[in-house]
Every structure is written in C-alpha cells, then in structure tokens.
Amino acid sequence: MNPTQKPLILLAEDDANQRALYCEELEDEGYEVVAAADGREALKLAEARRPDLIISDVNMPVMDGLDFMARLIEVAHGVPVILHTAYASYRDSFASWSADAYVVKNSDLSELKSHVKNLLGSANAA
C-alpha cells in the first residue's frame, strides 16, 4: 500500500442496513471501503481491488462467508480477514477458517474497529 493512500477494506455483508452502517463507521475512521452483498461479489472485488483487509459475514446468499474464505486464498492470499456474524456459537471454530479475528455482530462496533486497527497496524489514517 502506498503510504499516502487510505487503507482499503473490503466488506462482505448481505444486510443492506448493516453494510451501510459499517461502511460509514469505517470511512469515518479514515479507511476506504468497498462493499459486496455476497461472497461471489466479494471475491470479484478482492481480485480486482486487492484490499488491505477483508471483513466478511459468515451467513450470506450466493456464496457464504466460509466458501468465500476457501476461495479467497486464490486471489488474496495473505490479506487479513475478520469474520463477523450474529451467531456467537461460531466463535469456537473460527480459527479453523483461517481468519485473523472473529467478531460477533452487535450495535457496538468498538471491537470490530479495534481488530481493524490492530490488523492494519500503523497504516491506518488518523
């Protein structure tokens, strides 16, 4: 990533309201965000845009987050991934999905933002 550019985050989230909220919150933190409504669209964006970080829902139509993660290795190997879902029960198995972090969805986005900052390091905008 060019140090003068904002870090690029790819967000895969099927819920339009949550997608808009996450985009707004992350852009307010100084990131550029591209969004997809399903795993297939996210995979195409990952290949075309080469994001610095990916945030993916687990349950999505067309291609779910787990299939997306399996295919992601082909187009964006080494890009950090945060899985986020409404299902807390998935937390125990997220490590086997090769994600760098796992966040349960709720109205407080501080945990997600913290993981984003940690995974992007000092590259994030002020």
Image (cartoon, helix red, strand yellow):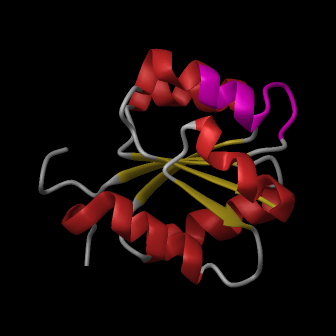
For residue 85, side relative to residue 76 (left or right): right
Looking at the image, the residue that sits furthest to the top is: 74
Residue 23 x %, y %: 58, 63
Residue 121 x %, y %: 26, 64
For residue 106, side relative to residue 27 (left or right): right
Q: Quadrant of residue 22?
A: bottom right
Residue drawn at (41%, 76%), measured in percent from left and top?
29
The correct choice, above or below, for 2 with respect to 69 in the image is below
For residue 67, side relative to residue 115 (left or right): right
Number of numbered labels in the structure image = 0
For residue 27, side relative to residue 86 (left or right): left
Instruction: Give the extent of the magenta segment.
Output: 60-70
Residue drawn at (37%, 32%), measured in percent from left and top?
50
The correct choice, above or below, for 66 with respect to 125 in the image is above
Q: Between 64 and 7, which is closer to the camera in this rendering?
A: 64
Q: Quadrant of residue 18?
A: bottom right
Residue 38 x %, y %: 75, 35
Residue drawn at (82%, 64%), measured in percent from left and top?
88
- Residue 87 seen in this snapshot: no
The correct choice, above or below, for 25 with respect to 60 in the image is below
Looking at the image, the residue that sits furthest to the left is: 3
- Residue 8 seen in this snapshot: yes
* Image quarter hosting the C terminus: bottom left
Residue drawn at (83%, 39%), measured in percent from left and top?
60
Is 2 covered by the magenta stretch? Answer: no
* Image quarter hosting the N terminus: top left
Residue 72 x %, y %: 54, 25
